[in-house]
Image (cartoon, rainbow, N blue to C red):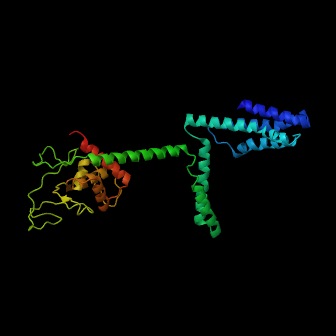
Amino acid sequence: MLATGVAGGAGTFSNIKAAYGSGTALGAVAAGEGATAVLALVLLGLTMLGQASPAVVRAGLWALPAAASVMSAAASPDGPRTVIYAITPLGMSVSAEGMAFLARRIVVHVDGRDAEAEARAAAVVQALAYHRARAANHPDAKVRKRSDRASWRLARKIGTTDTTLGDRLLDVQRERITTGADVALGDMFAITVTPAPAAVTADRDAVTAPVTPALPAGPEPVSQDRPVSDRGDGEDTQVNDPPPGLEGEGVTPVVAPVTLDQLAAIAGAPTPLIGEPLTDEQIVVVLRYLRYSADPPLSYRQTAAAFRESGFIGGEARIRGAWATLMAQEESPR
């Protein structure tokens, strides 16, 4: 790169010397290639320091050799050599840009940040904030309309050269794909646990165990002539209805003496409340409660539908992550 720049300066000196003399040629080289070399050193130093280069430096790298190109073209003795004379000074511009580009890539590789990209992103975000504020509050309707259009044009530029943002978005997408695959495989290969026929012993409650909370066997089936309410049966035993949205899907209620409050207390988490943001641990408690509120236990799709129909708050990604945690607890050795 340095040799290309030197060759361009020597060629410019030779071309102009033939027409205007050595003194004029030397001045042209100093004003064109020499000043370009100074700007190239400034650009290289700022890049190595991890700082963005001013716009005037980048503009000078091309404006000064362009002026030398015009002078060289004017000094050409004939038409065919005009193009050669005009192109010769641009060797310094290419050399300067090449050195600065290589230095910037080295800094990005070593430090993990691109000062030029960060400066451009900051300028775009600042301009976007200004135009959005002006589009919302300016008293002139025409100004508001122009700012609104400008903000949409600026929105397309956000993140286009931000390599860090791209890496983070890829990490988020990889995590979502991994969680989705884990949930899908858990649904495919999950083993339905049959409730234990014997009574639950005092030293281990199947619902409070850290693994699959197998519910105790229910009493004798209720005859058709004995009405069953949503509070209790004739023997004052609590009966759970199918979770909302799952009626008619082959889900039958089971006797569940353990409430959501008790499961939350066992997990050491606050009781999940409908309509309030839940922690990840609370979401696991709710999913466990809903999954084993029917016999056979609900699948992920049914449990997620019951979660939303019940009015609990939680995004799809958090529900999938909590389900993966619940499946991992069930598959852990007793």
For the residue pair 191 and 293, the one nearer the viewer reads as 191
For the residue pair 71 and 57, the one nearer the viewer reads as 71
Numbered marks: total: 0
Horizontal and vertical percent position of residue 282: 30, 52
> Which residue occupies 58% across, 46% down?
161
Q: Is residue 320 visible?
A: yes
Horizontally, residue 201 falls left or right of residue 97, namely left
Q: Is residue 140 visible?
A: no
> Which residue occupies 88% across, 34% down?
17
> Is 238 situated above or below 43?
below
> Which residue occupies 89% across, 35% down?
18
Horizontally, residue 190 falls left or right of residue 38, namely left
Task: Tell me the quarter of the picture where residue 301 sits.
Answer: bottom left
Task: Tell me the quarter of the picture where residue 271 sits.
Answer: bottom left
Q: Quadrant of the N terminus?
A: top right
Horizontal and vertical percent position of residue 67: 81, 43
> Is 279 situated above or below 38?
below
Q: Quadrant of the C terminus?
A: top left
Horizontal and vertical percent position of residue 199: 10, 49
For the residue pair 193 and 154, the one nearer the viewer reads as 193
Among all residues in the image, which is located at the extreme front? 80
Horizontal and vertical percent position of residue 44: 68, 36
For the residue pair 306 and 66, the one nearer the viewer reads as 66
Horizontally, residue 164 falls left or right of residue 224, namely right
Among all residues in the image, which is located at the extreme top? 3
